Amino acid sequence: MKYMIIFDVIIAVLGIYLVYSALRMNQMQKISTLLVNQDAIAKCRDKKGFIQSVYKKMAGFGAVSIVFGALGCINDTICDFGRAYNIVSVCVYLIAWFLFSREMRKDREKFF
């Protein structure tokens, strides 16, 4: 049994949760505790501005996670895309994660 499929499923589920949280955060106009803890939420200077700044980035990274996880599952079960695909896809995912983390850090500094 290939155990990498477990990680692919976890990443895909994480992506689904990120997209759901982003859309719900935008709809309810409440900052998700996935991003910031309760104590920090109370210190936010502009909650609506933070939500507008973050939710598209969060949904985008969630979408990247869903695609990465789904393609990883296909790669592990149905057909093998090859070693080059594995290397490139991991690099793309890590770059997306790095960019998302950097933007989140900037937004926290700006709004908190």
Image (cartoon, rainbow, N blue to C red):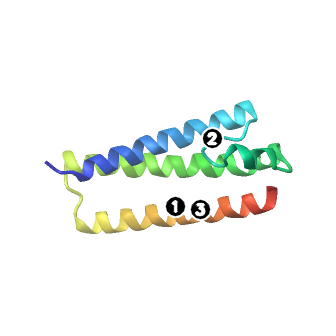
Residue furthest to the right: 45
Q: Residue at x 38, y 64 (%)?
A: 90
Secondary structure of the residue carrying tag 3 is helix
Asked if the residue at tag 1 contacts the one at tag 3, i.e. Cβ–Cβ closer than 8 Å, the answer is yes
Q: Which mark is residue 97?
A: 1
Bin the neighbour count of mark 2 within 10 Å (Cα to Cα): few under 14, some 14-19, many 20 and up.
Answer: many
Q: Residue at x 52, y 61 (%)?
A: 97
67 sits left or right of 22 in the view: left
Q: Amino acid under label 1?
A: Trp
Q: Which mark is residue 22?
A: 2
Image quarter (top left, top right, bottom left or bottom right) of the C terminus:
bottom right
Residue furthest to the left: 1
Give the spatial CA distance, label 3 vs label 2.
Answer: 15 Å
Nearer the N terminus, badge 2 or badge 1?
Answer: 2
- Percent x, y for residue 73? 28, 46
Q: In terms of image quadrants, where is residue 32?
A: top right
Give the spatial CA distance, label 2 vs label 1.
Answer: 16 Å
Q: Amino acid under label 3?
A: Ser
Secondary structure of the residue carrying tag 1 is helix
Give 109 or 92, whichever is nearer the viewer: 109
Which residue is denoted by mark 3 in the rendering? Answer: 101
Give 15 or 70, whichever is nearer the viewer: 15
Give the spatial CA distance, label 3 vs label 1.
Answer: 6 Å
